[in-house]
Image (spheres, rainbow, N blue to C red):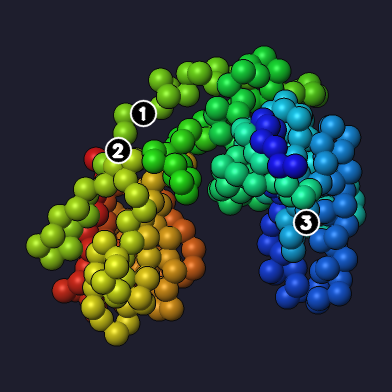
Amino acid sequence: MSQSRPQTILFADVSGSTRLFETKGDVEARRLIAMVLDALGEICVQHGGRVVKTIGDEVMCTLPGPLNGVLAACDMQRKMARDINFVRDNLAVRIGFHHGDALEEGGDIYGDAVNVAARMAALAKREQIVTTAASVKELAGKLPEIRSLGRARVSGKLLPIEIVDVVWQEDTSGMTMVQSAIRIGDHAAQAPPGSRLRIRHRDRLITLDENSDPFMMGREATNQLVVEADWVSRTHAQIEFKRGHFVIADRSTNATYVCIGQDNELRLHRDELHLRKSGTISMGQAVAVNVSDTIFFEIE
C-alpha cells in the first residue's frame, strides 16, 4: 500500500563519469563507478538509510531525517577524499539532498521531495554537498559549517528556494568539524539585496530579477528572445539566477560569445558562466561579425 511520510532523499553521482569512460574504457569505468556506488550505499546504511536504486553513475538513497542526511553526505565525501582506491583515479562525487514528504510505492520513492533533492544534486559541483536551507534549519549547533548559496529555481516551485552548501572538509587545526558559522534562519537577512539584470537587444529592453523564470534565447519563436539567423540554434542559450548570480548557459551548436567589461571575449560552448557588471552576448558568432544582433547586459 502506498504511503507518504517525511524522509530525507539524497542523490550522489560520480563527477566526470563521461571523461572516465573516455580515458579508462567501458569495462574499467563501469568497474570504478560500481565500486564508488557500493561504497556510498554502505555509508547510507550505516546512517540508518537504504539505497532506493542506482541509475548509471548515480545512487538514490532515503534516510530517516536531515541530520542522518548531513552525516551520511559528509562521510561519503570523506570516503572519496581519503580512500586510496578513489584518490588514485581522481574519483569524486557531488551530492544533493532534501527533507520532505515522499510517497513510497513498490520499493521506489516519488514526490516533490525527490524532485527537489535531484535538483540539489544537479546544482552541486565536484566534492560539494548542496541542500535546501529548510532541510537543515532545525539543526543549528549539530552541523558543520553551512554557507548560503543564495536562491535557485526548482521545477514545480513558484518561487526560487534558499539553498546552502555543507562544508564537510576537516579544518587545518585538527578539529573534527568547523562549527556552524552562520545561523540557518539568518540566511535571507544576510543575503545582499536582489540584483537586476537588464538586457538590451536592438530596440527591446528586458529586466530580470532573482524571481524571474529562466530566460531562453534562440531561433525558435518559443524563446523569450528570438534571433533569426542560420548560426543561431533553436534553443541557443539561457540566463538563470542561481547560487546568488545571474548565470548564462550555452546549449548550442555554434557556441555563445560573452564579453564582460573590458575583458577578452570568451567562447562558451555547452558550459556556464557567471555574468558580472556589464558586457555583451553574441549567439553563434563573435561580436565583431554579429554587430546587429549583439545583446548588451548590465547588472544593477
Q: Residue at x 86, y 74 (%)?
A: 27
Q: Please state if 202 lies on the left or on the right of 295 as rendered.
A: left
Q: Between disc 3 and disc 1, whose residue precedes?
A: 3
Observer-side mark, 3 or 2, equals 3
Which amino acid, mark 1? Answer: Pro
Mark 3 = which residue? Answer: 54
Q: Residue at x 84, y 46 (%)?
A: 41
Q: Residue at x 39, y 46 (%)?
A: 241
Q: Give how far apart the Cα atoms at labels 2 and 1 are.
A: 8 Å
**281 or 48: nearer the viewer:** 48
- Is residue 62 visible from the viewing direction of this image? yes
Q: Are marks 3 and 1 in contact (CB under 8 Å)?
A: no
Mark 2 = which residue? Answer: 195
- The answer to which image quadrant residue 95 occupies is top right
Which amino acid, mark 3? Answer: Thr
**23 or 33: nearer the viewer:** 33
Observer-side mark, 3 or 1, equals 3
- Mark 1 lies on a secondary structure that is loop
Identify the mark at residue 192; answer none if there is no mark: 1
Q: Give how far apart the Cα atoms at labels 3 and 2 are.
A: 39 Å
| Relative vertical location of residue 258 with respect to residue 246 in this rendering, above or below | below
Could you say where residue 282 lies in the image, as x and y percent from the top left? 29, 69
Q: Give how far apart the Cα atoms at labels 3 and 1 are.
A: 39 Å
The residue furthest bottom is 230
